[in-house]
Amino acid sequence: MYKIVTHPGSAHKDDFLSASVLLATLDNAEIFRREPTNADLDDPNTYVVDVGLEYAPERHNFDHHQDRSLPCAFHLIMQHLGHHDAAMLMFVWYPHMSMMDVRGPYRTAEHLGVDSSVLFATSSPIDGYILSTFAEVESLSCQDPLFALMKALGKNMLVLIDRKLKRLERLKAEARVVPVKHLKVVTSDISNSPKLAMELYLRFLDDERIVMSITPSNRGEGWELLRLGDNTIVDFRAIAESPEIRFVHGSGFLAKTQVRLPMQEVVRLACRAITDPE
């Protein structure tokens, strides 16, 4: 039986996610929210997380508070498990989560170039409820619903890293970039989770002239035409009356076709949505 020991009192994303990913990788583990003992720190079958004032991965101790140069405990554990570099690439929230935990919201906001009120305004009531529920328990075992949620979350995170890595390589091999007037569109006919890793592929392409994507719709049988970023050069309201179009969002950032038209026809529709002359 493995033990995961993390601090009592208020719960944070750092200790919660650390425990979640450990549950996903350990067989037959329990969580305890208390101060660690010396025996805990010396026992390699006990993972001491975000508490204990020791970073010793060989003995499975993952605290960062004693050393300002260390990232958050979640990053330390992801490094230990071999997923850190991939997570840095896959999840835009991942590096900033450590900064929030280690340096706080005000320094993080300064780093991001935004007012700190923006970070507080985007906080989620879902996060708040789950973390407050975690804060109220002293221990969790496999019989507890919260334990099951945490383990599923950890597994999903690791599976998603692998899925995104594989999809990125597939997009590099199969996706196409084609002209739409003086600009460009990226197209992909992958139907399963059609937009998975598309943001990574666009980052890989690093081409500011790509202003939209065309992928299979995840609702219905047609294509989805999506404006990339808040680029007003693209406005799909210009093609809303076309018989091939099933839906256009009221703000013009999204359109869906009735059926899966030949790609050349969809690209012609996309050209008509370019509202800015060359």
Image: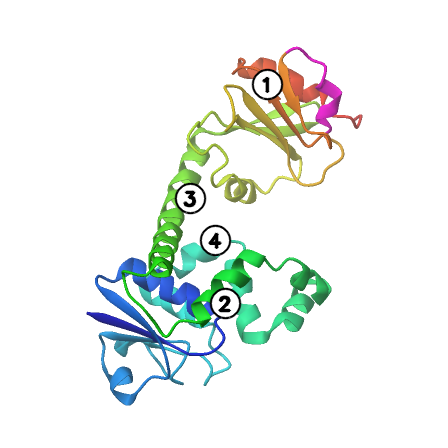
Q: Kindly indicate the quadrant of the structure image that contains residue 86.
A: bottom left
Circle 4 residues within 10 Å: few <14, some 14–19, many ≥20? some
Q: Are the residues at dot 2 and dot 1 in contact (C-beta closer than 8 Å)?
A: no
Q: Is residue 114 above or below residue 38?
A: above
Circle 2 residues within 10 Å: few <14, some 14–19, many ≥20? some
| Residue that numbered label 3 is attached to | 164
| Cα–Cα span, label 3 and label 1 | 26 Å
Q: Is residue 275 above or below residue 158?
A: above
Question: Where does the image place residue 152, in percent across and percent down from the top left?
Answer: 35, 53
First-in-chain label (3 vs 4):
4
Of the two numbered discs 4 and 1 in the rendering, the one whose residue sits closer to the viewer: 1
Badge 2 element:
helix
| Residue that numbered label 2 is attached to | 132
Instruction: Tell me the kind of residue under disc 4.
Output: Leu
Instruction: Tell me the kind of residue under disc 2.
Output: Ser
Quadrant where the C terminus is found in the figure: top right
Q: Nearer the viewer, residue 232 or 41?
A: 41
First-in-chain label (2 vs 1):
2
Badge 1 element:
strand
Quadrant where the N terminus is found in the figure: bottom left
| Residue that numbered label 1 is attached to | 257
Q: Is 114 positioned to the left or the right of 41 in the image? A: right
Q: Nearer the viewer, residue 95 or 33?
A: 33
**Label ID, residue 89:** 4
| Cα–Cα span, label 4 and label 1 | 32 Å
Badge 3 element:
helix
Of the two numbered discs 2 and 4 in the rendering, the one whose residue sits closer to the viewer: 2
Magenta stretch, residue numbers: 234-243
Badge 4 element:
helix
Q: Is residue 157 above or below residue 199?
A: below
